[in-house]
């Protein structure tokens, strides 16, 4: 038995042991207020109460998520978006820096916009704005991404040329509706027109600072070169519809560098902001749109980015921002100090912990917990509107995730006998659910590594696998033939086809000997091409 020890502690230390002096978690009426209008996150660690997130009691609906790589930030965002779409019919726009959401968005039936790879935005599209306002935005963007802000004369020349391009295009500078004499919509100018206007000015030879002009031209030309003119082509995206199109992935990974990605992201944010302001005050419950910035430090860091404006004004329009980062100091203070809720997943670096603890004011006990979290464990900090007797930071045991239903297919083409192939009733591929097979294999005692390998091979081949390769894989994972038979019978494969499958599997194994199965599958695919 342990002995009770009495030791000296200061009041300060005691107060930091939040547990001893406060109720450890917010009360039930806060944690599960109005579940039908909230997002389930997980159970609290102390009292095991389900926590349903909503923004009724906090300053605004915006969310920051911090945590080291692999701590579960993106997983939580996906879960959140799915539940928000169920609960509120929320739309979402994901600013997808590295293209990491693409696959998932496809699985949940969303829309993928691959900027620079088939989808383009014309920087000079007005998106329902007055040209004068749009010009101001474009100039601000250029100031963030180029050095034009350091050269007032070049800045002036550029702005003037953009204005001229609109006027040439018959735009009225302070009107929202733009039509020609016949009532047809006008065609927006592009940066190529701007370059031409500047070049014409240069060729006249009368302008007194030719070097300034040359530099202004050079800067804009970077955005208009053939092959790199991602933002000076006709828009292929209906910007107007973007905010009400379900889950939309703005995939920036097809753009060549950080600057063009930031240009794409900022432009999208600008259009979202305009659309938000035009949408009027929200009357319905729940969030209309969630804007996701995940690891987009280049624009999250900027105090001048439109992300900040969406955060400032979002609440009254029911627009929410979710911003995630490995490094909390990469989130602009203008944003971080304005989010209603922060989810802190595992954080290791002392300096990040210092920053978080300093800003959010949690106990040392909490700090210790955060630095030893496992995947999906989180502390939640809520910026309650009214002073509360309970702590504003509390622990969630584990974020309970939501995975979309994914279908995989076993391909039978090669093992169905001739007669059966003629018989239309025999399917050539068998669909089954990813989670179903995962559970089944766990049940059969297949190791985690083997399951991951099998799933990855399906994913790599567009969620398909030849049934013979599948059988070889299962055997290599230590599964006996009687179990494999049971499994395949469950998928409706008849006995004669089963025999064909095993015969082919034996032949294949002889043919390939000890080669890695992944290699065999790849070679098979190559041969078929
Ligand atoms: N709450 C969770 N429950 C189960 N698995 C999780 C959870 N959070 C993350 N994971 C898994 O952990 C891995 C890393 O998560 P991810 O969200 O990509 O991390 P991050 O975005 O922080 O780098 C993923 O494979 C994901 O499926
Ligand atoms: Mg991530």
Image: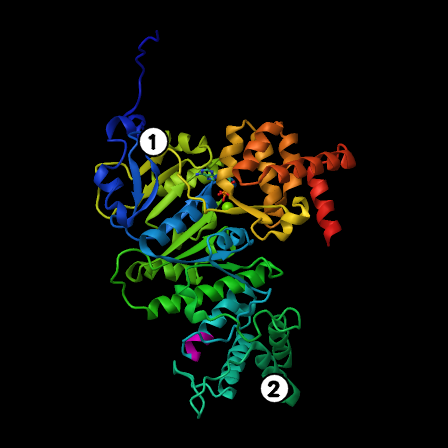
Looking at the rendered structure, the secondary structure element under dot 1 is loop
Q: x%, y% of residue 375?
A: 47, 35
Q: x%, y% of residue 136?
A: 45, 73
Q: Which residue is label 2 attached to?
A: 201
Quadrant location of the C terminus?
bottom right
Numbered label attached to residue 45: 1
Image quadrant assignment for residue 241: bottom left
- The nearer-to-camera label among 2 and 1 is 1
**What residue is rendered at 42% in x and 34% in y?**
370
- 2 or 1: tag closer to the N-terminus: 1
Name the residue nearer the viewer: 403 or 463: 463
One can see residue 68 in this view: no
Which residue, as the protein is rendered here, is positioned at the far bottom? 181
Find the magenta span and give its range: 131-135
Q: x%, y% of residue 513?
A: 77, 33
Q: Is residue 133 magenta?
A: yes
Image quadrant assignment for residue 44: top left
Q: Is residue 276 left or right of residue 144?
A: left
Which residue, as the protein is rendered here, is positioned at the far top? 1
Name the residue nearer the viewer: 358 or 103: 103
**What residue is rendered at 31% in x and 59% in y?**
318
Q: Residues within 10 Å of mark 2 (few under 14, many from 20)?
A: some
Name the residue nearer the viewer: 11 or 126: 126
**What residue is rendered at 67% in x and 35% in y?**
502
Q: Residues within 10 Å of mark 1 (few under 14, many from 20)?
A: some
Q: Would you say the magenta stretch is mainly helix, strand or loop?
A: helix
């Amino acid at each position: 038995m342990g002995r009770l020890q009495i030791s000296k502690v200061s009041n300060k230390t005691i107060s930091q042991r939040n547990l001893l002096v406060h109720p450890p978690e917010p009360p039930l009426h806060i944690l599960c207020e109005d579940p039908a209008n909230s997002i389930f996150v997980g159970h609290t660690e102390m009292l095991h109460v389900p926590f349903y997130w909503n923004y009724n009691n906090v300053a605004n609906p915006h969310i920051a998520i911090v945590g080291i790589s692999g701590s579960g930030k993106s997983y939580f965002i996906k879960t959140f978006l799915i539940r928000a779409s169920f609960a509120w019919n929320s739309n979402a726009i994901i600013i997808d820096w590295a293209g990491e959401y693409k696959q998932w968005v496809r699985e949940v039936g969303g829309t993928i916009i691959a900027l620079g790879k088939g989808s383009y935005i014309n920087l000079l599209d007005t998106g329902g704005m007055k040209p004068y306002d749009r010009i101001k935005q474009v100039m601000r963007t250029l100031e963030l991404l180029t050095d034009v802000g350091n050269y007032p004369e070049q800045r002036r020349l550029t702005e003037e040329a953009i204005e001229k391009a609109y006027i040439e295009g018959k735009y009225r500078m302070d009107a929202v509706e733009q039509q020609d004499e016949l009532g047809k919509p006008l065609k927006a100018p592009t940066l190529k027109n701007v370059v031409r206007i500047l070049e014409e000015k240069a060729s006249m030879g009368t302008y007194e600072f030719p070097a300034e002009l040359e530099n202004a031209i050079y800067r804009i030309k970077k955005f208009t070169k053939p092959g790199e003119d991602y933002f000076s082509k006709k828009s292929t995206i209906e910007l107007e519809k973007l905010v009400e199109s379900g889950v939309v992935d703005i995939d920036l990974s097809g753009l060549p560098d950080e600057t063009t990605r930031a240009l794409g992201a900022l432009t999208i944010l600008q259009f979202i902001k305009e659309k938000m302001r035009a949408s009027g005050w929200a009357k319905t419950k729940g969030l209309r749109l969630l804007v996701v910035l995940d690891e987009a430090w280049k624009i999250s860091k900027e105090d001048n980015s439109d992300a900040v404006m969406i955060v400032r004004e979002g609440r009254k329009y029911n627009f929410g921002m979710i911003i995630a980062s490995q490094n909390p100091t990469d989130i602009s203070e203008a944003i971080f100090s304005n989010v209603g809720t922060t989810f802190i997943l595992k954080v290791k670096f002392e300096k990040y912990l210092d920053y978080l603890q300093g800003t959010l004011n949690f106990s040392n006990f909490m700090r210790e917990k955060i630095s030893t979290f496992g995947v999906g464990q989180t502390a939640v900090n809520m910026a309650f509107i009214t002073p509360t007797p309970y702590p504003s930071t509390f622990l969630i045991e584990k974020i309970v995730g939501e995975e979309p239903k994914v279908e995989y297919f076993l391909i039978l083409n090669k093992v169905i006998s001739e007669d059966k192939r003629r018989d239309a009733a025999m399917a050539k591929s068998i669909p089954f659910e990813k989670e179903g097979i995962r559970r089944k294999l766990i049940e059969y005692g297949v190791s985690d590594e083997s399951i991951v390998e099998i799933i990855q091979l399906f994913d790599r081949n567009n969620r398909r696998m030849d049934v013979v390769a599948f059988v070889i894989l299962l055997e290599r994972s230590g599964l006996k033939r009687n179990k494999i038979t049971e499994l395949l019978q469950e998928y409706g494969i008849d006995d004669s086809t089963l025999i064909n499958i095993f015969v082919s599997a034996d032949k294949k194994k002889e043919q390939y000997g000890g080669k890695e199965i992944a290699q065999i599958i790849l070679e098979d695919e190559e041969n078929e091409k």
